[in-house]
Amino acid sequence: MAAILVLLAGGYVIDRFGTKRSITLFAVICVVAAVVTAATGELAVMLVGRFLLGLGSEPLIVAVTTALARWFKGKELSLAFGLNLTIARLGSVSADLSPSWARPLYGNWQDPLWLATAMAGVAFGAALLYWFLEGRAENRYQLGAAGQVDKLERGGLYRFSPSYWYIVALCVVFYSVVFPFRAFAIKYFIEAHGASRELGGLLNSMLPFAAMVATPLFGYLVDRVGRRSLFMTLGSLLLLPLFLGVTYLPPGRDVSVWLPFLGDFTAPLTLLVVMACLGIAFSLIPAVMWPSVAYIVEERRLGSAYALMTLCQQVGMAFVPWFIGFLNDRFAAGPENPAGYAPGMWLFTLLASLGLLFSFLLWRAERGPGSHGLETIVIGKGEGK
């Protein structure tokens, strides 16, 4: 709730005061939030800390995204975004595995929260370092403009081209498919396909691990060949048949595979193919989608554009899991009735088809006279067509 309330205001702050000030401000809020959460066991105080974390964390992500766009537009922008997503997912994996590598801290409830506070402190230190580096770079390199939002009419602050709204729509449906599916995929694999708990976890973990490796590679590719809207269309097309395939196709023979960090495991061929294709889409679409906004929106409004995009994404991600749960309950999905999961899979397929529609509309718009160069801008050939 806090993140939704603050995202649009945070986008205006980023555009008005610049990335270095905004990143530092939001990092300070995160540190304060972490301290408040860890300082006491009183529920009311911890809720205040969580609320403050929402106020700081989501705008901080938007500010970092905007900073990347300022630094790398016209350069290796997609590669930079891909590396950023890889580092972010590595952080999530590290947090998930912290009971292992920080085992001595898990003897009580408070020490892990102090560990999180220390990580927030590292982020604040990085924000200060970024302030220093950007301050030096502003006089040496060409960065995007900032601090000019007061010259805009407030009513026009969130008026963007159709291409931007196609990307936002694709963002909403894409994340509303992938993350809600991941949230209950282990349960689905166990109850609908008879997988073990270990196999379900391994299959589900293929997505973030694949994205950590493949997202920068796709970003590197797109920087050099262009065709951004076409790649988004291909990623959406790949996503379309997966959920009906895993629902209605036979599981196939068991196949032994080895994956980095995951080791050897055996799984039905159909599940492996579905999760591998989902991992490709999970890597390809974000690697192209987020940096494309920087080519469509003028630099002084990038913070607002990314904030609005993130807000719409979160609204979709809040609604779809509830609806999936409703469908699973309504049709009594479970180990005794695996077919009860089919309506939820049809919903995911419907959303994926909308994603294909929006990406196609984007591709058609970017091939027309009002294009922003998503199909033509490549590294080494400038930003023209």
Image (cartoon, rainbow, N blue to C red):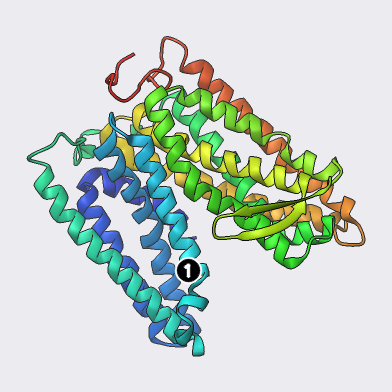
Q: Position of residue 75 (x, y in %)?
A: 28, 31
Rendered view: 315 above or below 44: above
Q: Position of residue 335 (x, y in %)?
A: 87, 62
Name the one closer to the observer, 7 or 80.
Answer: 80
Residue drawn at x 36%, y 72% as measured from the top left: 33
Rendered view: 361 above or below 253: above
Farthest residue, direction left: 139
Quadrant where the C terminus is found in the figure: top left
Rendered view: 375 above or below 113: above
Amino acid at pointer 1: Ala
Q: Secondary structure at mark 1?
A: helix
- Please rate how many residues cluster around mark 1, counting C-alpha atoms within 10 Å: few if below 14, some from 14 to 19, many from 20: some
Name the one closer to the observer, 377 or 196.
Answer: 196
Q: Is residue 2 visible?
A: no
Residue drawn at x 48%, y 74% as measured from the top left: 98
Name the one closer to the observer, 316 or 334.
Answer: 334
Residue position for label 1 = 95
Name the one closer to the observer, 247 or 302.
Answer: 247
Residue drawn at x 28%, y 28% as measured from the top left: 74
Rendered view: 374 above or below 257: above
Farthest residue, direction bottom: 107
Left or right of residue 363: residue 135: left
Left or right of residue 57: residue 267: right
Q: Position of residue 299 (x, y in %)?
A: 27, 33
Farthest residue, direction top: 369
